[in-house]
Image: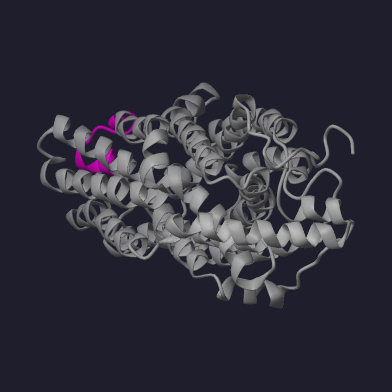
Amino acid sequence: MGNFGIQNVPKSKKIGLMEYFSYGIGDFSFCFIYGAIGSYIVFFYTDVACISAATVGTILLLSKIFDGISDMLMGYVIENVHSPLGKARPWLLWMAIPYCVGSALLFTVPDLGETGRVIYAFISYNLMATTIFTSMNVPYGVLSSVMTNSQNERSILSICRASFGALGVFLISSYAPDLVEFFGGGAQGWQRTFLMIGLVSIGLFWFTFYGCKERVGSGVMEQRTGKKSSITLKQGFQILCANKYWFIMLMVNIFYTAMTSLYGMNLYFAKYVIQNEGRNRSMMMCSTFAAIIVPLLIIPVVKRIGKRNVALYGGVGMGLLGQVILMLTAETSLTAMYLGLILRGMGVACVSATKFGMIADSIEYGEYRTGTRAEGFVYSAASLGVRVGSALASAFIGWVLGAYGYDGSLAVQSESAMRGIRIMFYYAPMVVFLALLGLLAFYKLDREYDGIMNILNERHRRQEMEHA
């Protein structure tokens, strides 16, 4: 096998610093678009493309239904496409250039009437988010599960992904408006900004492709035994139905992503409630700075008490505390508002830094329960939670603002619209954190993992002996 294919290295081979960096860079690039969708897509559609808030909510919800279907189909493709370059890595090579094109098209306003702009928004959103983004992001998620089966190394990979991803979200959320103005402002500025971001992303994705190695999983087992395996959609669903920890992480992903999508309310809160649109940048900095730093600081804590406990006690605990502070003081004290945003950001970061490793661990649990390893299906179905959470939050924002009379063309909103903004900024995140509290209480895989791996390693040893 060439240097760029599946690496035939011993299972004990540890992941090096540069490989951790290479993996993290991938999510840094993904989060340019992920962060832009979460922070600006509703604003872009309502205030730049001049589409009504209620229509935007419907566009996003319908699109996310298709997006969820595409996630499952991508899982099937991953399980049944066999490449000498690997099971997950080659998609980062193949789809980087389409990703660049889709980024620019997503933030383009065509010279059409309102109906034409609505149709274009629906098509371009689904081209980018449903097709191109899915074809890269699902394999990228699978990649951590085939790089290693060590819980500790997966935790560090998850932390690297969270830190670099948060940095990407921070940069795009904080500086996208400046870039838009730099490139001429208005619709033209948005299009040129994301064309530039797409061009940068090509190099970053290829860096991840060349820097990461596949060491474990069904792709490596196929190379060792010479036997290619395929999984049907029916088998994939059966594997998922037998995996309770996959279901928990699916729901965690839904609510976690809903929370990050609600960051988009910062711009509305800054512009209309505290009447200082420029304050949005400092608000985003409070939230995302915590998301960059916290994952790096909790590495020893995760190793000591486990991923689930960090997410439950650190993540949900700090998130709830931060949200309570915001509810009580955000409109009366800037200092207290920033403190609340930092604490909330720290809580979200604890969940972000651990959830990817928890999803990867659920792959082993599924193999233990069913005898079949299905990285593509398990991760694609778990990533469905990202699409659903983003869809529900974005659509809910649009619907609530529309129901309360928000009009993006007005400089001053009605009192009813202001109530809608406050509801989404104060109360919606509280509901999300309470849901995460209930879900994580049922996750016990950290304690069971070592015993499961002992059983799986013995199974793999017997399979290799049978095909020797």
As displayed, is residue 365 above or below residue 410?
below
Given residues 262 and 311, the one toward you in this image is: 311
Which residue is at 83% across, 55% downward?
222
Left or right: residue 289 compared with residue 421: right
Residue shown at the point (30%, 55%) measured from the top left: 406
Q: Main secondary structure of the magenta part?
A: helix
Judge left or right: residue 35 versus residue 241: left
- Specify whether residue 78 is in view: no
Queried whether the magenta region covers residue 315, the answer comes back as no
- Residue visible at 59% across and 31% down? 20
Numbered range of the magenta stretch: 269-281
The relative height of residue 206 versus residue 224 in the rendered view (above or below) is: above
Residue 405 at x, y = what percent?
28, 60
Q: On the rendered structure, is 68 left or right of 352?
A: right
Q: Is residue 14 left or right of residue 118?
A: right
Picture quadrant where residue 393 is located: bottom left
Instruction: Find residue 335 and report its horizontal and vertical position in percent.
Output: 15, 29
- Vertically, is 4 above or below 53? above
| Above/below status of 328 relative to 375 | above
The N terminus, quarter of image: top right
Tell me which residue sits at (54%, 55%) in the image: 361
Does any portion of residue 357 appear in the rendered image?
yes
Position of the C terminus by quadrant: bottom right
